[in-house]
Image (cartoon, rainbow, N blue to C red):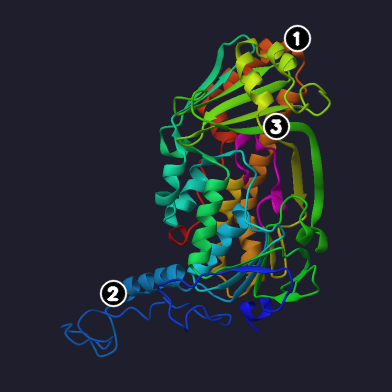
Amino acid sequence: MGAAQRARGLPGARVHRRRPRSQGPGAGRLHGRGHRGPHAHGPLRPAGGAGRGRGVPGLRRGRLPDRHQRHRGRRLDRARRLEAVNTGHAEIAGAGYAGLTIATLLARRGWTVTVHERSDAVREIGAGIFLHNNGLVVLEEAGLMEALAPKGTRLLRDRMVDHRGRLMQERDLAVTRTRRWSFPRQAPLEVLHAAALAVGVEVRTRSVVRSATPEGALLTEDGERHPADLVIGADGYRSAVRTSLGLTRVERRLPTTSIRFLLPGRQLSPEPMSTEYWSRRRRVALAASGPDHTYCYMACPEGDAAGSEVPVHVDSWSDHFPRLGDLFQLLHRSEPYKAYYSWVQAHAWSRGKVALLGDAAHALPPTLGQGSNLAMSNARSLVTFLGRFDAVADALQAWERAVRDTTEATQRWARYYDLVTKYWPNPLSGVRSRIIWAFGASPQLAARMRRADRTPPITESAA
């Protein structure tokens, strides 16, 4: 039974689906395992005759000269790597960055895809987001940046300023490997959602996933079982999919308060840059975020009662950052989005035909801005590995071996960043400033800390 058939008659479920204009009535059908997809090429043939050697002097019928035979084999190998993507049906828990990215990429390769979203709409909180090189590569390859770019700002510089107003670090973001865009958080999600619908992905809102089975099925709150060739748990750091499979090693809320704002106008951030201010155990940052908004975030230890207070405690924050008093007056009147840092480690990222993606596999502090970027990059790499193996379980294990090291290295550095803010002794703030300067001055240290920025997803051409 197809995904659309299963959705009929289920109370409370909203189905969002659009047939791609380029597809006819027979498009999007479920292909069996091992099927090479609708765009697979046949064997490559020599010019001048349908593989029989016609028009090639001195060539025996049905045989190529050795050097051409070897070249033909290499070409055929490459064609298979690029085009022979196994297809089937995928069920995905979660319509966030991870879920919608993998859904779109699979559907473009001939899969049928259903995404389950527990909320009544596909949406993000009203703050900002930084997209780095590894995430931007995925969006560019998918042809989505043309629609997305007008909604954001390409940042050219990133600055860190200490409690005395002195510059601790300044990074050039103009080169490809360090590039960064800033967006209102909803903007990339809307573009991904539209792209998913355009290629026939079925998005079911108010569909709450309770568990998954290694054999390949999602079980939802309404009692329905949704079988699939591939199941993706992209349902956040409190992942029901991960928990049901016994894959959780660590799931922890970290004692760091995060307060975020999306402010109208660009008066506070007229230049295409981001600036993060440090004072004692608090941080506050401002960044241009599209033509009409400024993104602001604040962080402090959860035990800092005044710093964690919403509305913003103007006097307390002004005491830490005297030059930003007017900003805190504005933030006091603005709508805050308060949350806490989270941390997830899994025993494994897959079991059977089920894979974990994004925060479900590796939630990390947002200090390096890599949560959604790693999710999109790892989703793109996963599609590549699904094309290399006939068995989904084998593909998932090979994918994890290839990408987990970079992901977990980024997790550790993001945590170190948080710890240096949260637990550093206040009397030694000057020492911390010099350490941060040293990281900015050392290309080797910067490369280690921002390894994910410099590590593009694994694509078919890299096979």
Q: Of the residues tagged 1 and 3, which is closer to the observer?
A: 3
At 43% from the left edge and 80% from the top edge, which residue is drawn?
A: 24
Point out residue 136 in the picture as x, y percentages from the top left corner: 48, 47
Q: Residues within 10 Å of mark 2 (few under 14, many from 20)?
A: few
Give the x, y percent position of residue 320.
Answer: 70, 13
Q: Is residue 380 visible?
A: no
**In this rendering, the label closer to the viewer, 2 or 1:** 1
Q: Which three-letter amino acid code belongs to the residue tagged 3? A: Ile
Per the model, the C-alpha gap separating discs 1 and 3 is: 25 Å
Q: Residues within 10 Å of mark 1 (few under 14, many from 20)?
A: few
- In the image shown, does 106 or 446 lie closer to the viewer? 106
Look at mark 3 in the image and give the residue it sits on: 259
Left or right, residue 431 beside residue 43 = right
Classify 34 as above or below 429: below
Secondary element at tag 3: strand
The residue indicated by pointer 1 is 427
Front one among 8 and 99: 8
Q: Earlier in the sequence, mark 2 or mark 1?
A: 2
Question: What is the spatial separation of the Cα atoms under label 2 and label 1, in whole angstroms?
Answer: 72 Å
Residue interval drawn in magenta: 357-371
Q: Indicate the secondary structure of the residue bearing disc 1.
A: helix
Image disc number at residue 68: 2
* Residue name at image x 54 percent, y 75 percent: 86
Q: Earlier in the sequence, mark 1 or mark 3?
A: 3
Q: Is residue 203 magenta?
A: no
- Residue 366 part of the magenta-drawn span: yes
Neighbour class for label 3 at 10 Å: few (<14), some, many (≥20)? many
Residue appearing at x 55%, y 30% in the figure: 446
Q: As shown in the figure, which amino acid type bears the numbered disc 1?
A: Pro
Q: Is 182 drawn above or below residue 419 in the view shown?
A: below
- Residue type at the position of mark 2: His
Depicted 394 relative to depicted 337: above or below: below
